[in-house]
Amino acid sequence: MDYKHGKGIVVEVDEYEWELPGGIVIRANSQLLIYVLGAAFADQFSHSKYTAVVCQPRARHGDGPVRTATYTRRELMAFLELVRERARATEVPGAPLHAGKWCRWCPKSGDCAEQDRETSEQAGASFDELPPEGGLEVPTDPQLLARKLLWVDAIDVWCRAVESFAQRLRENGTEIPDHKLVQGKTNRRLRSVPELVQAVKDAGLDGSKLYQEPKIKSPAQIEKLGKPFKALIGKKDAETGDFLYTMKPPGKITLVHSSDPRTEVTLDQLAQFTDLDEEQTEGDWDE
């Protein structure tokens, strides 16, 4: 059994059709079949049939959260022969590479010539040129569209891998032409709820309006309570110029084109920033 807690990628038990040695054809998920092979080896292939089970309770699927596929001993032995053949092929110098949506799990994703070549071919883009202003041309032929649709996931994987790899390089000191690191945008949060509540009370305002059960409202929601509340939220420290009751935490560092108006984050500053705290409740933030 393979338990999958994620819901973003639905796991199929019969993802691909496999042509195995001996003329055997099956539909299977290769990862699951390798798991089954491990179980079969453990009992020395003593059973005539083996069943692979995927349990993915958080993902919607027409066959429900639990899916199964059963394979005979003969099918498993044929798949084992194929796995051995493919494994030996990887040890040959200059072994061929094959790009696809499986590149998502490869550590070289985003830095692979074959992945670049296939993505360029399928997207109809030349990476030696600047992208067209109107975007890439979308085919109108149904057959060609069907083929391109098969590559949407793989191209999406490539795009995110390129962004991630480029940002990693820049954070480690490598210059990326025409790109820079900046802070991502964040929303305001309250500095101190007790201090704001006291300030509202001192101003003779109704403090109960600050809350939206079971938590305090965001700065933007408080401003909508009326001019007195908006004026209070907008108060600044006379010396520092900082807002008294709100603040913006540092944004997540991201790599953008140099034309972006945000201030560049230097490598010396990089260590000072931390990712946003995902544990904050919704009421602490602007909407």
Image (cartoon, helix red, strand yellow):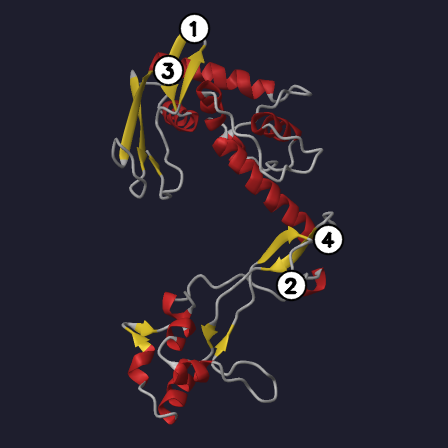
Inter-mark Cα distance, 4 to 1: 53 Å
From the top left corner, tell me how far across and down residue 35 is, in percent: 40, 29
SS at circle 4 = loop
> Label 1: how many residues lie within 10 Å, few (<14), some (14-19) or many (20+)?
few
Give the position of the C terminus as an image quadrant.
bottom left
Q: Nearer the viewer, mark 3 or mark 1?
A: 3
**Residue identifier under label 2:** 271
The answer to whether 10 is drawn above or below residue 264 in the figure is above
**Residue identifier under label 4:** 173
> Residue 88's quadrant in the figure?
top right
From the top left corner, tell me how far across and down residue 64 is, in percent: 25, 34
SS at circle 2 = loop
Q: Nearer the N terminus, badge 4 or badge 1?
A: 1
Q: Tell me, for residue 22, which label it has, or none.
A: 1
- Residue at 47% x, 64% y is 277
- Residue at 34% x, 15% y is 73
**Residue identifier under label 3:** 26
Pick whichever, 44 or 145, lies toward us: 145
Query: Marks 1 and 3: in contact by CB < 8 Å?
Result: no
> Label 3: how many residues lie within 10 Å, few (<14), some (14-19) or many (20+)?
some
Pick whichever, 97 or 124, lies toward us: 124
From the top left corner, tell me how far across and down residue 76 is, in percent: 38, 17
Query: Marks 4 and 3: in contact by CB < 8 Å?
Result: no
Q: Amino acid at mark 4?
A: Gly
Inter-mark Cα distance, 3 to 4: 49 Å
SS at circle 3 = strand
Q: Amino acid at mark 2?
A: Ala
Q: Nearer the viewer, mark 3 or mark 4?
A: 4
Query: How many marks can you see?
Result: 4
